[in-house]
Image (spheres, rainbow, N blue to C red):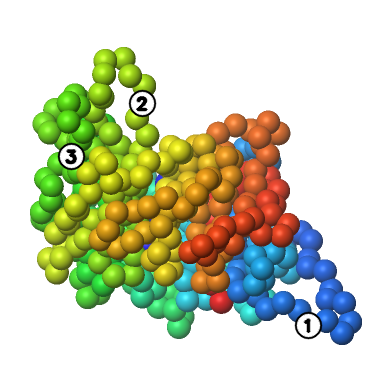
Amino acid sequence: MRCTRFIPLGFIICAASLVLIGCNGSSAVPGSGSTPGNTPTGLTPSPTVAYVYVSSQTASGGPNQIVAYAADAKGQLAPVPGSPFNQSVSPMAASGGYLLAASLSQADINTYKIESNGALTLGSQFDYTHQTGYQASGGSTCGDVYGFVFDHSGKSLYTGVNSIDCSSNRGIASFAFDSSKGSLSYLGNVNIGYQSSAAISVLGNNAYAYSALYDACMYGGISAFSLSNTGLVDLTPFVQTPQYGPPAPPGAKISGVKLPSYSAGFTATDTTNHVAIGEYPCYVMTAGAGTLPVQLAAYTADASGNLTTTDTYATMPATTVDPQGVEMSPSGSLLAVGGEGGLQVFHFNGASPITSFGSALTTDNISQMFWDNSNHLYAITLNAVPPDVYPGKLHVFTVTDTSASEAPGSPYAITYPMALAVQPE
């Protein structure tokens, strides 16, 4: 399960200049970019192992477009025919041969069919503000969606919701996804307050999900959610052991209101019942000491969704980056951590402590990452400054349990990357 930093979206009037058939039609999406080169005569083209999509601004402050690539077995990328596609969307997620993305021109979740060559065809458009009840009096709307997360089956989609019910709180909306038609059906939402994160990670059994309670070490903690057979998400009571997270070193001075030694951050799950959590220290050892690094804890979930860890300050590895997200590999044996300061990979060992893999793969600031099923890790850079000062990049790494290296041709220049989605073949 993937857990990423979500990008809030605003709404503007649907642009009449879109080349698509109106705002409700369906047509192949045109592009204006380059196409892959021809394969020399007598050579067999390398098979595509994944399609990679990046939502990118055309210029600083300009509309978005979707830049699409086909990745081969070595992780080398070639532009998809028609890329870039003139679609102003962000964020995105891919599953079941479809790309789903939130429109920036109106309050829609767009569904694009991924064709056999990776090109995109616009399908259904789901008006989430009017169909999910996020509408204030007088006809105005609120509650923009941000961040898309599929469950492990690909049949349920979850999105964060800003200003849910036109309040200052956040929420999580649940949708059923029919991959045979590429259509969404709204299931419902849950109000999670203004401190809890909607960046959920779904457990391997699709029965529970978890996210952090961002309260700056006031109380610390994790939010737990139950997922019904239909995919509807709801808050659920659970027990965390130890109650306030892993214990701090002896002599540490706790800064929280109660007893948290650490404040939970980004989460990621493996394919069974384990959860990786970035733990932000809520203590200092000596007065005036600098900020301590984020450490990584491994938790195990029981049949009721309760979480337990045996980790302590001494067993958790420290990161060298300020995390913007964590991503578990499909095998569940590797954990990628990206953020300000770079991208790292760790060995994930189930219930046992997480262990170091090696040095950072890059020191570029990273905002989002995804794995394919062929040992490739894709990452886009964080846009903290205008692109003319710090050009955007798409990195591709080949990572196994024993080695890691940058793929041929990587990194790729991206004008202003905003969101990333990967559809493994």
Which image quarter holds the N terminus? bottom left
x, y percent for residue 268: 35, 56
Q: Which residue is mark 1?
A: 44
Image quadrant where residue 16 sits: bottom right
Q: Position of residue 300 (x, y in %)?
A: 21, 60
Amino acid type, callout 3: Pro
Category of crowding for the residue at label 2, using alpha-carbon neighbours closer than 10 angstroms: few (below 14), some (14–19), many (at least 20) = few
Say which residue label 2 marks: 291
In this view, the residue in front, 377 or 360, is 360
Q: How far is disc 2 from disc 3 in space, using C-alphas?
A: 18 Å
Is 44 situated left or right of 282 in this image? Answer: right
Circle 3 is placed at which residue position?
247
Looking at the image, tell me whether mark 2 or mark 3 is earlier in sequence order. 3
Residue 93: percent from the left, percent from the top? Answer: 48, 62
Instruction: Give above or below for 13 relative to 254.
Output: below
Amino acid carrying mark 2 in the image:
Thr
Query: 33 above or below 164?
Result: below
Check if mark 2's residue and mark 3's residue have beta carbons within 8 Å. no
Q: Residue at x 25, y 23 (%)?
A: 285
* Residue located 68% across and 78% down the image: 47
Q: Earlier in the sequence, mark 2 or mark 1?
A: 1
- Give the mark nearest the N terminus, 3 or 1: 1
Q: Residues within 10 Å of mark 3 (few under 14, many from 20)?
A: some
Q: Which residue is at a point 37% across and 34% down the rendered structure image? A: 293
